Amino acid sequence: MKNNRQIIFSKYLPTKDKRCRNSIYIVKSHVEDDIKEYIVDGEGNSYLRECTGCEEGYKEKGLDSKDGTIKIEEKEDKIDLSIGDIYSKNIKYTKDDTRNLEEVLGELYKMRLGRPVYGFPEVKLNIQDREVEIGSTISQNVSIQYIQHDGGRPTKYRIIQNDREIFERQNKTITVKNITKPVYIRGEVEYNEGECKTDDIGQIDCEGRIPQGIAETDTVIITPKKKIFYGPSSKTPTKSSDIRQLPGSSLGEEIFEIVTGTVNTIFIIALPKENSIKKIIDLNNAKMDITKEYIKIKTDFLVKDAGGEDRQYDIYELRIDVPYLENTKHLIKIK
């Protein structure tokens, strides 16, 4: 077994930052027979040595130190190492092992229970995915929340839209006009290196320390969609405003309901050109299939979107002779 440790005789054990790494301190106090041996590893951690079968004069029984007590038992062909009850296992190695004691101590130290766990920072936006009518203009307050965990302090915030930097600020109201394509918004936070934490025996343990870096939020998507318009009407629509004034609308849901009321005899469904009716059920009349009673009366009918641009729609109409005697619901499924 290699033995290249420096042996230092001293009246006291220095503080961790002043200890000579990979060394042995023989500490003899003013009490003549009070001799202790400390083994110091490559990180400056010290271990009070209990030795059975070692040189006379360095035997200490049942002693402990802040950093833990190392027990070394030399046998005929091997050496057993353990450190108190805070380690998950012992290490055994033969006397002709090519590792030196400090290397083995390092392995043992890393096996201990209760090592600190480091958590990376998290960042979140205050907004969520949403759908808007195509052509809409939105004004949205965007805010980045930085959850530090074990990272360092934040040094820079960014709000980014469609991979283009917008504001180097944590909070900002942004405006997007005439949305015709998906809008992608995300946040970034640059942060410093985090602090080291201590383990279960009070040692500073920097393994796993959070380095300086950048944390990103999930990307929030604002998706433009063509509206579906529907509901009872007093007349057959002839212009865009007649469609937009219908009482019901949705942003592309595949299932919706028309509530007939007890006044009108005309019921309208206006679908974007890419959609069509799959099935219509009269929920209040034995769940009858009335799909064929909604007749397509207009194709390529122009309806203005939220930004005033014309979009092509197909118009379906149901006409009855007299109003319903009571509210009825028509369940519409589209594709």
Image (cartoon, grey):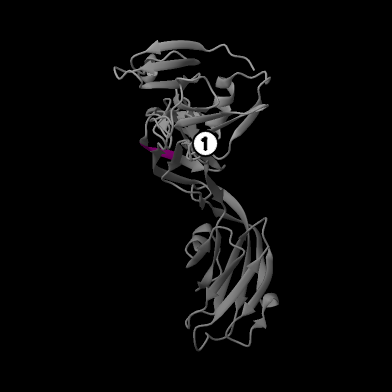
Q: Is residue 225 left or right of residue 23?
A: right
Tell me which secondary structure the magenta stretch mostly adopts. strand
Q: Is-magenta flag for residue 275?
A: no
Question: What is the magenta range?
Answer: 172-176
Q: Is residue 38 left or right of residue 237?
A: left
Give how far across and how far down residue 77 sits, in percent: 68, 26
**Based on the displayed image, in which of its 4 quarters is residue 69 positioned?**
top left
Q: Amino acid at mark 1?
A: Arg
Q: Please determine whether, in this image, residue 304 is positioned above or below residue 248.
A: above
Q: Is residue 188 visible?
A: yes
Q: Please determine whether, in this image, residue 85 is positioned above or below residue 92.
A: below
Tag 1 residue: 112
Location of the N terminus (image quadrant): top right
291 and 166: which one is in front? 166
Give how far across and how far down residue 217 sits, in percent: 49, 39
Q: Please determine whether, in this image, residue 293 is positioned above or below residue 42.
A: below
Seen at 50% across and 40% down, the residue is 113
Seen at 55% across and 40% down, the residue is 88
66 and 265: which one is in front? 66
Location of the C terminus (image quadrant): bottom right
45 and 79: which one is in front? 79
Q: Secondary structure at mark 1?
A: loop
Give how far across and how far down residue 19 sits, in percent: 41, 15
Other residues around mark 1 within 10 Å, as few (<14) / some (14–19) / many (≥20): some
Q: Is residue 163 visible?
A: no
